[in-house]
Image: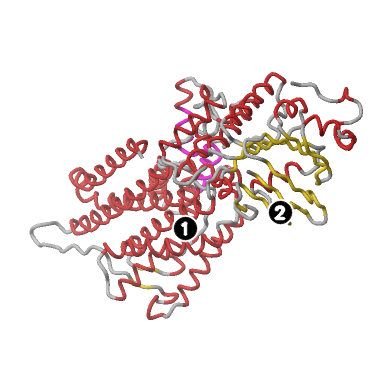
Amino acid sequence: MLRVDGLEKRFGGLAAVSELSFQVEEGEIFAIIGPNGAGKTTTLNMISGLLTPTAGRIELAGRDITTAGSAERCHAGLGRAFQVVQPFPEMTVEENVMVGALYGKPGTTYAAARRRAEDALERSGLDALRTVPAVELTLLQEKRLEIARALATDPRVLLLDEVMAGLRPAEARLAVELVRGVRERGVTVVFIEHVMPVVRDLADRVLVMNYGRPLASGSYQQVTADPRVVDAYLGRDDDEEEDEA
Amino acid sequence: MRRALPDLLWTLLLAAVVALAPTVLKALFAQASVSYLSLAANAISLAILALSWDLLARTGQLSLAHAAFYGAGAYTAAILAKLGGLPLAFDLPLAGVVGAVLALGLGSVTLRLKGIYFAIATLAFTEVLKAVVQELPTGLAGGAAGLNVPPLFRPHFVPGAMQRWEIAYQRNEAYFYVYGGLLVLTILVSVLAQRTRLKAAFTAVRTNEEVAAVMGVRPARVKLLAFVLSSALVGMLGALEAMRLGSVIPDGTFAVSTTVFALVTPIFGGLYTTLGPILGAGVLSAVEETLRRTFAEGYLIGYGIVLVASILFMPRGLVGLANRLARRRRGTPPAADGEEAG
């Protein structure tokens, strides 16, 4: 569904991402983990079109989207929730979601957009808050709104950037359920996460990045047992691992 | 579309008021109605200028080229009249098309610029267009001296059947209707932009262009559409003003002050709304006229003070102030900044 081939991003002389290739199958939940500065968000930004790669190729459902604009990628089926939540501050929750519903796919009628927005609000547990100004939401609600907006664009692949960051364990569990629900609808999910129990619970496959390069990939068990991953990211002492969820 | 219905009804009501106003004014004030109609046309002109500028502002672009499109429309009317004179039914749309085409050209190149850079580029465009018009063959555009524009209406005095002042009344009444018509058209465009899916795109692009794009909105197209609509409307206004004022001249027709009024009025009345620019135009026209009658000399200083004070104390304009008062009366806590009226 999503294919990344030889992706590279240089900022001046610094390679933030290089030699990155991976493939995500349809309906899969795919996690990207790694220490801060490993290039995870840069990768997501290249996939969603906010950054142009200096080399490499990105394919969505067989279509080359390497140089496509953000809007075009969205129309092709790419949804994105941001790490730093960025709701449109002047709009209510519902209006925020309607932007994605109206413009996510060209040719959507108003009535169809309305239905899609309703559906996204319901699935994200925001239906009671639809008329609330987006600036009045709590962090968990804002994260839900990020996901709801992305869902409203009717994506085939959903990119989630650290959706769990800052959430309390109980909240994170709700978010995990939300992501599972998304996948059950046939949406492929690619997510960046630091909270390891969330990765364990959600991911079918995990890609570990370090210094902008892929370090290891495989199941959660495989990568967490990999001594290179332990050295670079998880640390030797198991007690350091956050046990949040 | 269905959500636009209440606003469309309001617009219809306004159109009815415009239609009746001259007759009522004449019945009430007789000869004085002549100058009232002229003042009303000034206020309507300011309202069209402001509301058309606000259309683009809703996408987050601060244009300093409004005078350029206004001037382009004015010169279109002047040159057409010189070349032979078409009826208004052709002149006006043509002036709109000239504005739209220029905006399409300028917008395709400059709308990717953000904030202050776009503003500077549009200001430069105004100066360039003024220079170009000045350098056109004098036989065509009149050079630095400009052109005379024949008036749109030339009422005839019928001895015995009417009084002298009624000539002026008939002329002003006719202009009032045409200006009122263009105002209604501008309001219709604004209402449709506020009550259809365009509103979501405009606001999304204004508040966060990158996120809007990730959600499928095409910011470049949205901004270009707003720019073209905005410029077409002000182009038509320029054409009408040229005919009403009777001449065009580069320094006056492409005056920076036109742009300044175009942006100050919506800020004063309430940005990103239909009501705000209209309300702002009405109040500012009244304030200016009152000041002018009270202090013939230096009244503009007082006008400036009123503007600065109102922008300091009403950051969201008259409409924002009204919303704040309404909330206080209802006893609800002041909500987010997002309060907007149609």
- Range drawn in magenta: B304-325
| Res. B237 image quadrant | bottom left
- The spot of residue A208 in percent (x, y) is 80, 38
Q: Chain of mark 2?
A: A
Badge 2 amino acid: Pro
Is residue A129 rendered to the left or right of residue B173?
A: right
For label 1, the residue is B66
Give the structural element (helix, strand or loop) at label 1.
helix
In the image, residue A132 lies in the stretch drawn in magenta: no
Which is closer to the viewer, label 1 or label 2?
2
Is residue B304 rendered to the left or right of residue A138?
A: left
* Between A135 and B53, the one nearer to me in the picture: A135
Residue A53 bears which disc, if any? 2
- The spot of residue B115 in percent (x, y) is 60, 52
Q: Residue at x 32, y 66 (%)?
A: B246
Q: Dominant secondary structure of the magenta stretch?
A: helix
Mark 1 crowdedness (10 Å alpha carbons): few <14, some 14-19, many ≥20: many
* Between B319 and B214, the one nearer to me in the picture: B214
In the image, residue B322 lies in the stretch drawn in magenta: yes
Mark 2 crowdedness (10 Å alpha carbons): few <14, some 14-19, many ≥20: many
Is residue B297 rendered to the left or right of residue B117?
A: left
For the residues marked 1 and 2, what is the alpha-carbon distance in whole angstroms? Answer: 38 Å
- The spot of residue B102 in percent (x, y) is 46, 64
- The spot of residue A50 in percent (x, y) is 65, 48
Q: Residue at x 46, y 42 (%)?
A: B199
Badge 1 amino acid: His
